[in-house]
Amino acid sequence: MSREHRFTVQLRPEPEGGFTVLVPALPEVVSYGANEAEAMANAREAIELALDVRRDEGEEIPEDVATLIRSLSVAA
């Protein structure tokens, strides 16, 4: 029986529409959805697949990581 895992997800609105989803604790997971609900559903599926691969390869399932998002200005 597997236990439930909770992960922080970052939804980034895309200029052409939709959302890209990143999962800081699972950097291999990047997903997309045309709207927030679809993005979250696709992220759930991608996370489940990533966890399956990690289990199959004997890798640890990481705990969620605290994430801070800040804005930084740089000269270009």
Image: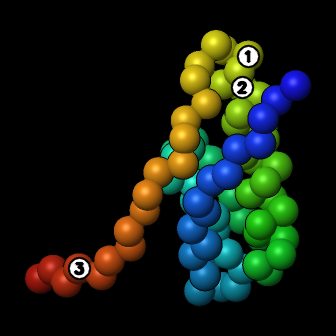
Where residue 48 sits: x, y (%)? Answer: 78, 41
User: Which residue is tagged 3?
Assistant: 72
Disc 1 to disc 2, how far (Cα)?
5 Å
Where residue 44 sits: x, y (%)? Answer: 79, 54
Asked if residue 75 lies left or right of residue 37, the reply is left
Q: Residue at x 82, y 49 (%)?
A: 45
The one nearer the camera, 12 or 14, is 12
User: In the image, what residue type sits under mark 2?
Assistant: Val
Asked if residue 37 lies left or right of residue 22, the reply is right
User: Which residue is tagged 1?
Assistant: 56
Give the quadrant of the N terminus: top right
Asked if residue 71 lies left or right of residue 40, the reply is left
76 to 3, vertically: above or below: below
The one nearer the camera, 47 or 20, is 47
Q: Which residue in the rendered view is the most extreme toward the right?
A: 1
Q: Residue at x 71, y 33 (%)?
A: 51
Asked if residue 49 lies left or right of residue 31, the reply is right
Q: Secondary structure at mark 3?
A: loop
33 to 1, vertically: above or below: below
Where residue 3 sits: x, y (%)? Answer: 78, 35
Q: Earlier in the sequence, mark 2 or mark 3?
A: 2
User: Which residue is tagged 2?
Assistant: 53
Q: Residue at x 69, y 58 (%)?
A: 31
Query: Is there a contact, CB below 8 Å, between mark 1 and mark 2?
Result: yes
Query: Is there a contact, CB below 8 Å, between mark 3 and mark 1?
Result: no
Q: Secondary structure at mark 1?
A: helix
Q: Secondary structure at mark 2?
A: helix
20 to 27, vertically: above or below: below
Q: Is residue 26 visible?
A: yes
Q: Earlier in the sequence, mark 3 or mark 1?
A: 1
Disc 3 to disc 1, how far (Cα)?
39 Å
- Locate residue 47: give its quadrant: top right
